[in-house]
Amino acid sequence: MFGPEPAGICDFTVRCKGCGENIPAPVRTLPDSWIVAECALCGERRRYLPSEIFRGRLSQRLSALRGRDLGPGTVRQVKPR
Ligand SMILES: [Zn+2]
């Protein structure tokens, strides 16, 4: 069962130590020890501690890389004023 997820929000995100972009951690639950995540953007393969995993918005460069359109209105955040 997959509910609609907020665009670009990942429960388990790490900040790439190579390029500084937010990438998804390859986990489904918070791990007890460090994990290895490989960045799809710069190819940097690093270890990340559980304390470095957070819920956050993934890099928009990732969605561009996947060639997946997140849909109209989700990428741009235009505040009417
Ligand atoms: Zn990277």
Image (spheres, grey):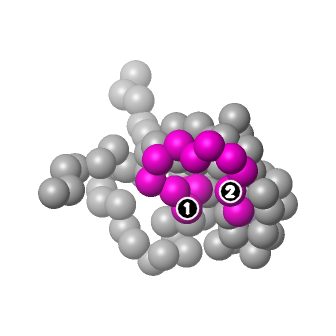
Disc with the residue nearer the chain's start (2 vs 1): 1
Quadrant location, the N terminus: bottom left
Q: For the view shown, which residue lies furthest in the right direction? A: 18
Is label 1 within 8 A of ligand 1 (CB to nearest ligand atom)? no
Amino acid type indicated by mark 2 = Ile
Residue under label 1 = 26
How much space separates mark 2 and mark 1, taking CA atoms? 8 Å
- Say if the magenta span includes residue 27: yes
| Quadrant of res 65 | bottom right
Say if 10 sits above or below 66 in the image: above
The residue sitting at 60% across, 63% down in the picture is 61
- Give the total of numbered labels: 2
Q: Is residue 48 left or right of residue 10?
A: right
Query: Residue 51 placed where, x, y %?
Result: 69, 35
Q: For the view shown, which residue lies furthest in the top direction? A: 81
Would you say residue 57 is visible in this rendering?
A: no
Residue under label 2 = 35
Say if 16 sits above or below 41 in the image: above
Q: For the view shown, which residue lies furthest in the front direction? A: 32
Quadrant location, the C terminus: top left
The residue sitting at 52% across, 38% down in the picture is 55
Amino acid type indicated by mark 1 = Pro
Magenta span covers which residues?
24-36
| Quadrant of res 16 | bottom right
Q: Main secondary structure of the magenta part?
A: loop
Dot 2 alpha-carbon crowd within 10 angstroms: few under 14, some 14 to 19, many 20 or more: some
